[in-house]
Image (cartoon, coloured by chain):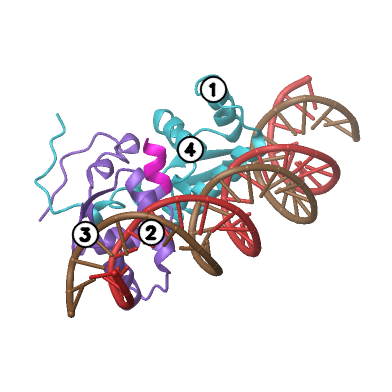
Chain colours: A purple, B cyan, C red, D brown
Amino acid sequence: MTDDVFKALADPTRRTVLDELTERDGQTLFEICARLTTKHGLASSRQAISQHLAVLESAGLIRTRRQGRYKFHDLNTEPLEHIVSRWLKPERPERHP
Amino acid sequence: MTDDVFKALADPTRRTVLDELTERDGQTLFEICARLTTKHGLASSRQAISQHLAVLESAGLIRTRRQGRYKFHDLNTEPLEHIVSRWLKPERPERHP
DNA sequence: CTCACAGGCAAGTCGCCACTTGCATATCAT
DNA sequence: ATGATATGCAAGTGGCGACTTGCCTGTGAG
């Protein structure tokens, strides 16, 4: 469960995918591939990204919806919310200026 | 930098070590080994835990202090504080009831 | 219908990581 | 000093994970 989330976050390419989806949600596989190479300087093949997306989805960090021949990928940050709180002392509410 | 932190968190044994140090800070290697086997049901060798502690330390999640023949391990949660905030939308301040 | 496009599946390769094994060093009690 | 305690170092092994390669399925435009 949380093990899948941490394993998914262990790979830098997958974290960059999450970055890209944070900036623009609901992208297809090809869009993600294109933007990873151009904007982030990553030369990853389509199959590699496809497998990364599968890992992210089975970790619950991505939800997908099919529409015709397109498959859109939506970010789901819910598994991230309290993933590190187990090690943090009970704190004063954080400031978000 | 953050890559080391995520890689360190990828291993379930290392996360359990952080759990143990959260509960009781400043333990030695042998203390951690003993408590992992008894309380957490993990049968890890001393050398294995030693290498895990080295990974956690180089990730900045643990600070160590020598005292005679003992080496105490102190938790450092600072690298964890904002490790996932890059994917979280700017939020209303969380409630800590 | 036909073909280009978007994506899926599966086997295989390669490198890294967790763990072991064996020995070495340092500190303290007696 | 001697042995027990606490830890360190380094080479070797096994398995998992990231990536490739090749082919297949489904969808929609012309």
Mark pair 1, 4: CA separation: 13 Å
Residue stretch rendered in magenta on the structure:
A1-7
Q: Chain of mark 2?
A: A
Disc 2 and disc 4: Cα gap in Å? 26 Å
Q: Residues within 10 Å of mark 3 (few under 14, many from 20)?
A: some
Q: Share a chain, discs 1 and 4? A: yes
Mark 1 belongs to which amino acid? Gly
Mark number displayed over residue A22: 3
- The residue beneath circle 4 is B12
Residue drawn at the location 20% of the way across and 52% of the way down: B88
State the mark number for residue B41.
Answer: 1
Position of B46 relative to B39 (above/below): below
Q: Could you say where residue A30 lies in the image, as x and y percent from the top left?
A: 30, 68
| Upstream in sequence: badge 3 or badge 2 | 3
Badge 4 local density, few (<14 within 10 Å), some, or many (20+)? some
Secondary element at image label 1: loop
Q: Chain of mark 4?
A: B
